Amino acid sequence: MVPDVSTGDRSRGLLSYLFGPGRRNEHTDPHIVAAFAMPGINDPGRVPFDQHHGALSELADYLDQPVKLREQRLGKKVPQHVWHCPVRTAPGDRYLTDEEWAEVARRIVHSTGIAEHGDDAACRWIAVRHAEDHIHIMATSVREDGRRPRNKGDGRRAQAECRRIETELGLRRLKPGDATAPKTPSGPEVAKAERQGRKNTARVWLREHAYAAAAAARDEDEFFAVLTSLGIKVRPRLGPVTGEVTGYSLATADDTDAKGMPIFYSGSALAPDLSLNRLRERFGLADGKAAGQATALHTSRTDAGASWRQADGELRAAYMLVTGGTAVDEADAKVQAQAAAFAELLHNTAVSAPRQLRAEIQAAAIAFNRANRSAIRADHRAADALRQAGRTLLTSSTGRDGDFVAAALTSAVFLLIALSEWHAQRGHAQQAAAAQQSLVHLRAAQQHAARPALAQLAARAPSPQAQDRLAAAVRATIPDHAHRILADPAWPALSTALAQAESAGNPPRRALADLSKQRELDTADRPAEVLVWRLRTATAERVSQRARSAASRSARPVKNAIRTAVPAPRPRALGSDTHRRGF
């Protein structure tokens, strides 16, 4: 059951909508199911058609009487005096009768402070039903005694009451809110998107692109430049005294009002963490040295394998931090920072990953945007390494290394699971649910990336005798996980990886001992597959280090040989042009 509290200043206008046909003729049988008190006032939904407009005006005047009396006494307008709260059941919930909806309305106005039970001087209100799955509660927020109601935090209080109503009425239990969710698109926004044949409203489209731009940018100037390059209109907000930028608004090129002017949405209206102040907390986290490193990473092209290896390593480090955290506020702030940096890394991965994986990773990134925000304030400096690793992916060369991509995605899956559990342990129901939704897409991408490489490794599995020897090494080195590893369908692929590591000079028992310390094996559904990617990346790193060492050792003798092989230049005559020029 979802309540949505808002305010306005036109009682008659809202009543016309509630008792009208709806914007798309979706209203059926509008009528009042509950009210504060209506002596002699007609229900506009139950009068003949020719009396409909008169009944609406009569009801508006009745609801506005305390408001007008207060205005006469104070000599000024009462701002935003119309209180509005639609309450909707979740898809699949059972049908509620008018009597049940009336009780819901009475409980909502009581819990929010609009009209508490037994308070004869409370605000005037009505509850209108014009569809099977929801009602609209409307009130004028001036009490009979002329005072304003004590309804601070009414949205949060309505949410809490709806959670109790769901339990009592046997409805689907929704996740409680925590004031960190972005504003949902309005009805007119949704209708406009449908008319234009768009999948998302302008608000949602701008939000997704703002997140992606923030993930790729190093500072706010680059953030605005990326948005502009996407065809998004950027309007900075300037301070009246200093003239400095204090905020910003975004608009799409084709989302205009009735006068043809672009409709702008402020960053905070898109999402709480997209306000300029929140973005500056992330952009300004590094000192000069770190910022210089970020610039070097951003402007130079790096080896694709190295970028994915770096991302894999930082994802594993973040996993260790999240799973090793405590309930201490400082530790929670660092974990929240890892969540924010991980959200950015997902967006950058969606751009950098092989093309066949991008759709699923992008869907994972969009879903995780909700898990990125909680009531805990992030210590962004603690996640600088993970954030930089994500940005480095944007600078990788066009070549792709399937092993490193699969390994990084595997680490990302484990980190996402850990963040989901962390949110759940702290009662962050909305964030935990969003993380689980993101996990579905990320797992799909990881499995898609892993399947070809695992099949290739399994096809090259060593002889049965060699596999028996390697299995014995697994039992001796990792006895707690040996049974699950050997029963994993990825065991043939792991046996090939172990044989390759042995050929590269890393004995199986030593390689397995190094890998057995990783916590992922405790929760992995397929521990052999996890070991495959860990082993493959470790082997590749050893080979790469050997190549670099060999190159550095051979560089100096070759350079000396070249120096001795080149004959010294013959002295020129004193009268030559070179001598006269002073060279």
Image (cartoon, helix red, strand yellow):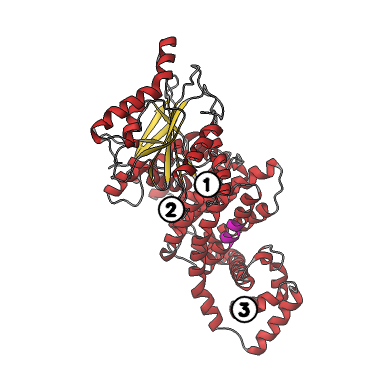
* Residue corresponding to mark 1: 294
Q: Amino acid at mark 3?
A: Trp
Q: Is residue 335 above or below residue 509?
A: above
* Residue corresponding to mark 3: 491
| Contact, mark 2 vs mark 3 (Cβ under 8 Å) | no
| Contact, mark 1 vs mark 3 (Cβ under 8 Å) | no
Task: Please check the rendered image and state whether residue 329 is part of the magenta-colored stretch, yes or no.
Answer: no
Q: Amino acid at mark 2?
A: Ala
- Label 1: state its secondary structure: helix
| Chief SS of the magenta region | helix
Q: Is residue 360 above or below residue 368?
A: below
First-in-chain label (1 vs 3): 1
Q: Is residue 561 above or below residue 458?
A: above
**Distance of label 1 from label 3 (alpha carbons):** 40 Å
Q: Which residues are magenta?
A: 411-417
**Residue 203, x across and y down, in percent:** 38, 42
**Residue most toward the front?**
40
First-in-chain label (2 vs 3): 3
**Distance of label 2 from label 3 (alpha carbons):** 77 Å
Q: Is residue 487 above or below residue 553?
A: below
Residue 78 visible to an observer of this rendering: no
* Residue corresponding to mark 2: 573
**Distance of label 1 from label 2 (alpha carbons):** 54 Å
Q: Amino acid at mark 1?
A: Ala
Specify the quadrant of the image occupied by residue 499: bottom right
Specify the quadrant of the image occupied by residue 128: top left
